[in-house]
Image (cartoon, helix red, strand yellow):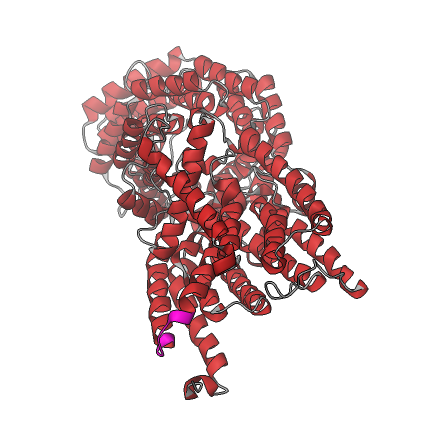
């Protein structure tokens, strides 16, 4: 049959490649604009090892620096972080580029092996929606990078030992040429690079032996000897990863208490799940339903028995249909082996299957399916292929939308798997971050209905209830979380914060100390304990804990700022100024640190410098109550009443329950001589709000003085004189004689039916 004119054209191949790439980029366009999602914080956005050369050294020398020892992955993130910071577009583009390169390498590999339908198989791999999770998820750089080195290693091996067509050699493998032995070394180095990206690639030497058996019909002793170093390296990396999964990732607990028969059931069902998703890739979910495995249920045994039956049938038919189908199926199953349930991997806590587990394994079944189908297509096979690829592209485009942000990810997951307790909890976290505490609490409760022993949901529900004002229930839940896992310090720490807000400083200190007994290196627990100790007057201990916190994490701007505030409180102004400057250097957008820096400068009589810091804080955070209040104080002292009133009001708007801001604003509105600012009725209202927030016996004398001035400004002189008398008496009880004399002088004005006009009150 003559070749169609279309395919004979010299523009056919580059045109087809261009069209394929356009469809590819369009299919992944929704993910390109996506942000960081689950685990991306640990891998990239909050990964301290990506910030310095010391971190890069740690990536390579300390297997426990991150939860998984994949130094090439983290090195790629290190480079990208230094090139474009935390802009996610760059990370997504690299993932897309690596996936495209893997497709190109696969095409070269299939052409070398002379497999039918190579171009279509590669296009299918490029656009298939089961690959979305590996390509659109930044964290799964592990898959696309390890796949890149895996395919390069396989290319290098075939340069070292070119495999003849099946059955063309009857007497075993020929000796490779001496010049080809360098490719053996290259293959081993590239294999190690693949393992340092993700250890699922440890299946490569087994795949090589299967390819040898496919081509030659036998595996010789020489073949085993050549692949032995590959098996040894793969085994070592596999053991290290298995240890890290249990020790640091968290692949332990009741979810992993499966018997040997139950693990066989999981493996058999998983194999059929992955094969089915390749043929019918819908619906796809980030987290699939976790199966209930029961070895006493007979139908569950159908999955592993059917898998064994397929392999046995293909083996029996190898002389009739060739060894290729059996090899493809064995490579598929073998590449999936680390994720089939025989070994503990953390995601099995939520589901026994995940799309990203079959990134490499899917290639073998895709190639087999295409090799079987391609010769049977009609004359219009390119149209049929285009329909399949466009269908895959559209499904990929639809699935890529789920990876735009955390909200789209968890909503998509809950839509497809409403019983996913982890998705309920994580979506609750999204809602909490935006301040929607009621709905967050609802999703935490839903998670606990499905999984009552879910400690993260228990602790997070406590946090939501704390913010909603239900402190008693929040405290109960924190204690429940602690009882569920006394080895987790964060719940002691969070309980300490709750207790501290209730004014239970002693109990809060005990909670922080309990957190540090579990984890002495918990830097923020040291810092918050220091704050509680400062409030309790235990200054020396507080400073020690601040120093320890900074020793553990010197780059924590919040801790540096708090340490500076503590130094300022005990009169060490120069040291405090150094700490505030350092905090602002560590985080140039830390508004509160600029406010504290300004306060310290104001205390040193550098009002100009203080004003500059307050203004910088307001550039960062225009509604910052502290910056507005402190700037208003400076403006009032400088006689700029209109601007002072404006910033007092902004401070109150941002923090309506701040007695000092309410009182200062009331004083200005009551005592200023500027008619455009003077507002006696507003002064009365603000002073009344301040008094309600500081009821007797906790009402300070200066607040009563403000109230008296507001009453006098409103013409209520008798009541003003009465309140001023109470303020004077209280001041004398407190031995504030000078202030009492000032109040007495104002009282005389009120008794003579005159109001008081002056600047801010003496406090």
In this rendering, the answer to whether 606 lies above or below 692 is: below
Residue 739, how many percent across, how many down? 41, 21
Look at the image and say whether residue 473 sits in the magenta stretch.
no
State left or right for residue 404 relative to residue 535. Answer: left
State left or right for residue 211 relative to residue 692. Answer: right
Q: Which residue lies furthest to the right in this view?
A: 178
Residue 207, how many percent across, how many down? 59, 52
User: Which one is in front, 321 or 547?
Assistant: 321
- The residue drawn where x is 51% and y is 55% is 318
User: Which one is in front, 25 or 748?
Assistant: 25
Q: Quadrant of the N terminus?
A: bottom left
- The residue drawn where x is 19% and y is 22% is 718
User: Which one is in front, 574 or 199?
Assistant: 199
Please tell me in which quadrant of the rendered image residue 186 appears.
bottom right
Please state the total of marks drawn on the protein image. 0
The answer to whether any part of residue 462 appears in the image is: yes
Residue 530, how many percent across, how many down? 54, 23
The answer to whether any part of residue 755 appears in the image is: no
Q: In which quarter of the image is the C terminus?
A: top left
In this rendering, the answer to whether 151 lies above or below 594 is: below
For the record, the magenta segment spans 375-381
Residue 416, how many percent across, how many down? 28, 45
User: Which one is in front, 483 or 150?
Assistant: 150
State left or right for residue 715 relative to residue 469. Answer: left
In this rendering, the answer to whether 738 lies above or below 284 is: above
Look at the image and say whether residue 378 sits in the magenta stretch.
yes
């Amino acid at each position: 049959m003559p070749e169609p004119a279309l395919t004979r054209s010299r523009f056919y191949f580059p045109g087809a490649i261009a069209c394929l790439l356009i469809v590819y980029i369009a299919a992944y366009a929704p993910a390109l604009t996506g942000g960081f999602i689950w685990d991306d914080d640990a891998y990239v956005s909050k990964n301290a090892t990506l910030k310095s050369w010391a971190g890069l050294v740690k990536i390579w020398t300390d297997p426990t620096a991150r939860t998984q020892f994949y130094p090439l992955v983290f090195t790629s993130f290190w480079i990208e972080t230094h090139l474009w910071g935390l802009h996610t577009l760059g990370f997504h583009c690299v993932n897309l580029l690596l996936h495209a390169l893997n497709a190109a390498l696969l095409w070269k590999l299939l052409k070398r092996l002379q497999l039918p339908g190579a171009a279509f198989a590669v296009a299918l791999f490029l656009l298939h929606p089961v690959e979305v999770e590996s390509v659109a998820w930044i964290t799964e750089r592990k898959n696309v990078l390890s796949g890149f080195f895996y395919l390069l290693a396989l290319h290098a091996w075939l340069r070292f030992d070119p495999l003849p067509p099946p059955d063309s050699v009857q007497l075993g493998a020929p000796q490779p040429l001496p010049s080809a032995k360098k490719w053996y070394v290259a293959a081993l180095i590239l294999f190690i690079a693949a393992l340092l990206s993700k250890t699922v690639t440890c299946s490569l030497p087994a795949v090589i032996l299967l390819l040898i058996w496919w081509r030659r019909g036998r595996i010789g002793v020489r073949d085993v000897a050549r692949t032995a170093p590959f098996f040894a390296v793969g085994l070592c990396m596999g053991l290290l990863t298995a240890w890290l999964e249990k020790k640091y990732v968290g692949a332990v607990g009741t979810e992993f208490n499966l018997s040997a028969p139950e693990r066989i059931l999981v493996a058999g069902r998983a194999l059929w799940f992955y094969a089915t998703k390749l043929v019918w890739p819908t619906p796809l979910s980030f987290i699939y339903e976790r199966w209930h495995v029961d070895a006493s249920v007979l139908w569950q045994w159908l999955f592993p028995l059917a898998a064994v039956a397929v392999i046995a049938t293909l083996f029996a038919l190898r002389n009739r249909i060739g060894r290729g189908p059996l090899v493809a199926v064995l490579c598929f199953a073998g590449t999936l082996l680390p994720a089939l349930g025989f070994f503990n991997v953390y995601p099995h806590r939520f589901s026994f299957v995940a799309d990203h587990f079959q990134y490499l394994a899917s290639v073998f079944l895709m190639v087999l399916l295409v090799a079987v189908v391609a010769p049977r297509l009609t004359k219009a096979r390119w149209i049929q292929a285009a329909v399949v690829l466009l269908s895959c592209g559209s499904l990929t485009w639809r699935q890529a939308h789920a990876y735009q942000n955390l909200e789209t990810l968890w909503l998509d997951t809950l839509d497809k798997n409403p019983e996913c307790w982890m998705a309920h909890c994580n979506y609750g976290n999204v809602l909490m971050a935006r301040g929607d505490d009621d709905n967050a609490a609802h999703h935490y409760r839903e998670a606990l209905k499905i999984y009552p022993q879910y400690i993260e949901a228990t602790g997070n529900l406590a946090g939501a209830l704390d913010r909603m004002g239900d402190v008693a229930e929040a405290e109960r839940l924190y204690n429940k979380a602690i009882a569920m896992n006394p080895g987790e310090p964060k719940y002691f720490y969070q309980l300490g914060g709750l207790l501290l807000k209730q004014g239970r400083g002693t109990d809060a200190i005990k909670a922080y100390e309990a957190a540090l007994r579990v984890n002495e290196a918990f830097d923020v627990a040291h810092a918050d304990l220091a704050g509680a100790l400062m409030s309790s007057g235990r200054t020396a201990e507080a400073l020690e804990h601040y120093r320890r916190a900074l020793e553990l994490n010197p780059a924590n701007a919040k801790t540096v700022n708090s340490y500076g505030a503590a130094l300022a409180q005990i009169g060490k102004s120069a040291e405090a100024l150094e700490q505030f400057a350092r905090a602002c250097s560590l985080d140039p957008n830390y508004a509160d640190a600029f406010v504290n820096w300004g306060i310290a400068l104001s205390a040193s009589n550098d009002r100009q410098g203080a004003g500059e810091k307050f203004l910088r804080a307001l550039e960062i955070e225009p509604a910052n109550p502290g910056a507005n209040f402190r700037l208003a104080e400076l403006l009032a002292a400088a006689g700029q009443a209109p601007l002072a009133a404006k910033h007092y009001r902004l401070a109150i708007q941002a923090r309506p329950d701040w007695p000092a801001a309410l009182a200062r604003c009331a004083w200005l509105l009551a005592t200023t001589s500027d008619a455009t600012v003077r507002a006696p009725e507003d002064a009365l209202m603000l002073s009344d709000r301040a008094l309600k927030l500081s009821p007797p016996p906790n009402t300070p004398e200066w607040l009563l003085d403000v109230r008296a001035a507001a009453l006098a400004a409103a013409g209520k002189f008798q009541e003003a004189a009465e309140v001023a008398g109470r303020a004077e008496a209280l001041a004398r009880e407190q031995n504030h004689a000078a202030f009492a004399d000032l109040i007495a002088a104002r009282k005389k004005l009120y008794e003579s039916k005159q109001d008081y006009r002056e600047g801010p009150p003496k406090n």
